[in-house]
Amino acid sequence: MINLNDIMETINMISEENLDIRTITMGISLLDCADPDIKRSCEKVYDKITRKAENLVKTGEDIEREYGIPIINKRISVTPIALLAASGGDPVLYAKALQKAADTTGVNFIGGYSALVHKGFSAGDEALIRSIPEALSVTENICSSVNIGSTKSGINMDAVKLMGKIVRQTAEITADRDCIGCAKLVVFCNAVEDNPFMAGAFHGIGEPDCVIHVGVSGPGVVQAALKKCPDGDLGKVAETIKRTAFKITRMGQLVGTEASARLGVPFGIVDLSLAPTPAVGDSVAHILEEMGLETCGIHGTTAALALLNDAVKKGGVMASSSVGGLSGAFIPVTEDAGMIDAARSGDLLLEKLEAMTAVCSVGLDMIAIPGETPAEVISAIIADEAAIGMVNSKTTAVRVIPAIGKKAGEELQFGGLLGSGPIMKVNLTKSPKKFIDRAGRIPAPLQSLKN
Amino acid sequence: MKTVVSVIGKDAVGIIAKVSAVCAECNANIVDITQSVLQDMFVMVMLTEISGLNCSFTEFSDKMKAIDPDKGLDIRVMHEDIFNSMHRI
């Protein structure tokens, strides 16, 4: 029989330490739905998604019940809609078709209202980007992302300039709902094609027609494991995180292969990310504090995060047949109880978060900024973040929420997984306007010449 | 297919009897059982073979949970593969 201690450990992880499968995400290619008539195209999109994902939610719930593992979200990612929008028409119609498909299938998000413009705009890209504010305001469960740079191609500063304005417009148009539109909009550098996590999930064009990805989580489990080694050196800390990440990922692999078999869809990847939630005991910041930092955000935070991010990857890699997505530690501010506290107390600043993104798995995530922040400053934040990603050959992203009508120190409330949090201070004393207005392209770095 | 039935909570008379009764009612065969009481805390783990179940897995699971309507006990029915995959290479 299985060891009693092992059984108790697993049950404890689930009941006390918030271990869960954060998401089962079905990637669906919509390339075969393109049609010169946009209405016909939208019908095909709706039909294909509802056909492929008909049993997604039910299968997720069945697995949840049989294995006793909470599966929090069932989601869908689709081909970047800009590729369909290339054939003309108002892209918002696609957003509405996706929303209808989300309602029918019962998933809580569909990601992929996206455009990939890291080297330039092609037909459909600009129209889609300009439609993002409206699309996110008339839908509830649709997520949007735009890739504006990559290590291979440099940074498209025309797109960066445009995205500063789009982020602001999205906040303005949803100002009556705590600017929630911006919580569903990510600007990427080096976006990955198989990411199961929102808001940045989309189904890359190199992916199969339909595929199942799994995103695991478990910051609480890692923190609890570290509590058991209060005095070990950092080598011991890394080892403990690796062991825990291994177990968590094995669970993700099991659920992923089981879901893929039941749905008759190939299994894609396990994304072994530590994704925090606002719940107590589910915080990445608290892991860093468990390592010995008095609070997250002080000097030493970047080093601690680098150790955590690396150990999570190392532990998870052996546990899965295929690791992908973003895999590492997320640091979304409003979704992490420890980050929220550190931001409120003023110990965690935007500048420190930027440094942390050089070693975490993604970037500046779920950060509320003052409503007065002009578009060019948002563009400059995006450019800085993209530069970190481009030079370090890693994914970086910006998901900031300009809190229209509010100032630094006030709070935004999104509720649910998106959480709530204080509006962080942004340096607005001097302007980067001239730099951003130059536009053009930042050439790819030497790192791109690997062939 | 085997499942692990776990019951954790305050000790009381007849817990195992009730769990076993549900197993018999649903035609689940008990393969292994281990139980202890530590400082008033009752911990029981039972491995059951459920290939011959005469009801659905969900019904079996719901009946187990219905043993304790006061919710003082944490009763879980979980597929054994979850433990095998997490703790064995």
Image (cartoon, coloured by chain):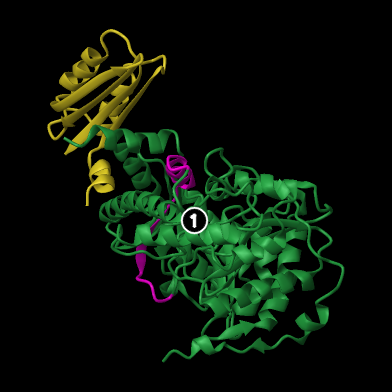
Which residue occupies the foreground of this view, A227 or A31? A227
Which chain hosts label 1? A
| Residue B71 in picture, x, y percent from top left | 41, 18
Relative to residue A121, is residue B46 depicted above or below?
above
Q: Name the residue located 50 percent from the left edge and 52 percent from the top edge.
A: A275
In the rendered picture, chain A carries what hue? green
Q: Which chain is yellow?
A: B
Q: In front here: A93 or A157?
A: A157
Q: Which residue is mark 1?
A: A101
In the rendered view of the protein, which quadrant contains the C terminus of chain A?
A: bottom left
SS class, disc 1 = helix
The image quarter containing residue A170 is bottom right
Give the magenta range: A205-230
Q: Is residue A228 magenta?
A: yes
Q: Position of residue A61 (x, y in %)?
A: 37, 42
Which amino acid is tagged 1? Answer: Ala
Q: Is residue A409 visible?
A: yes
Along the horizontal axis of the image, is A310 left or right of A303?
A: left
Say which quarter of the image contains residue B63.
top left
| Vertical order, B10 against A202 (above or below) | above
Image quadrant containing the N terminus of chain A? top left
- Give the answer, above or below, for where A72 lies relative to A4: below
Answer whether residue A5 is magenta in the image: no
